[in-house]
Amino acid sequence: MKVLIGANVAFFLLQTLVPDLQLALALVPSAVVVDFQIWRLVGYMFLHGGIFHLLFNMLVLWMIGTELERVWRTRYFLKYYFATGIGAGALTVLFSLLPFGFASPLYNAYIIGASGAIFGLLLAFALYFPDRPFYMYFLFPIPAKYFVAILGAIELYSSLAVMSGVASATHLGGLVVGYLMLKGARVDPLAELKYRYLKWKINRVRKKFDVYSGGRANDWNRRVH
């Protein structure tokens, strides 16, 4: 957590001193598609549009990221953070290629900020702590699961609105990638095959030694095996 926050602050200061850094690292879908500048899928996560943009993202990162890192440990936390941030950028590039008016402004846009990864963390927090309250506008307590659902609906509407801010598609991408990682976590086919094989072996041994998980119907005491 400290390293991530420190890196974002350091890049913001460097970005202030060297404005051309934004031109080199910002996510520009056309540059990724045409010139294959894939480093932008990572670089854009460490740039911000102003001090308040940086402070808000780092505040949310500290508030919810600390608890998630405690649950996941550092290795998986970093894996999830970068996967949602990079995945959000990749989905933004794909979104910009859609032949619709609401998507075309994204193709040559400059997108910066850690918000894709931050929205992924928000989704994870809502899944792990669904009833933990968030204060919308710092006034109204709303359970995390409803708060994130409202944010998702807002970002979906904003990404489809022609005049919306271009970052909405990236925010939505962070939610989508986070959901796929956490709810569709069985992405390792080898591990799944091992699990199925061991389960088959256990069931085979049970039948061989006449072991039944729930007891036979004519057992005088179904708790005795």
Image: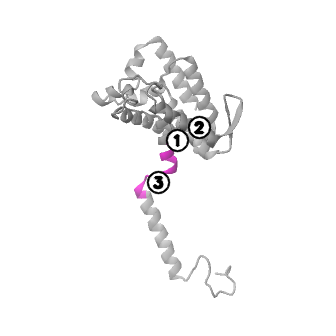
Identified at 61% across, 44% down, the residue is 71
Tell me if residue 116 can be seen: no
Q: Amino acid at mark 2?
A: Ile
Q: In what element is the residue under mark 2?
A: helix
Q: Which mark is residue 150?
A: 2
* Majority SS type along the magenta span: helix
Q: Using the image, determine if residue 44 lies above or below residue 84.
A: above
Identified at 48% across, 16% down, the residue is 14
* Quadrant in the rendering for residue 62: top right
- Closest to the observer: 204 or 38? 38
Identified at 50% across, 82% down, the residue is 208
Q: Amino acid at mark 3?
A: Arg
- Closest to the observer: 60 or 67? 60
Tell me if residue 167 can be seen: yes
From the image, tell me which residue sits under label 1: 75
Q: In what element is the residue under mark 1?
A: helix
First to last magenta residue range: 178-190
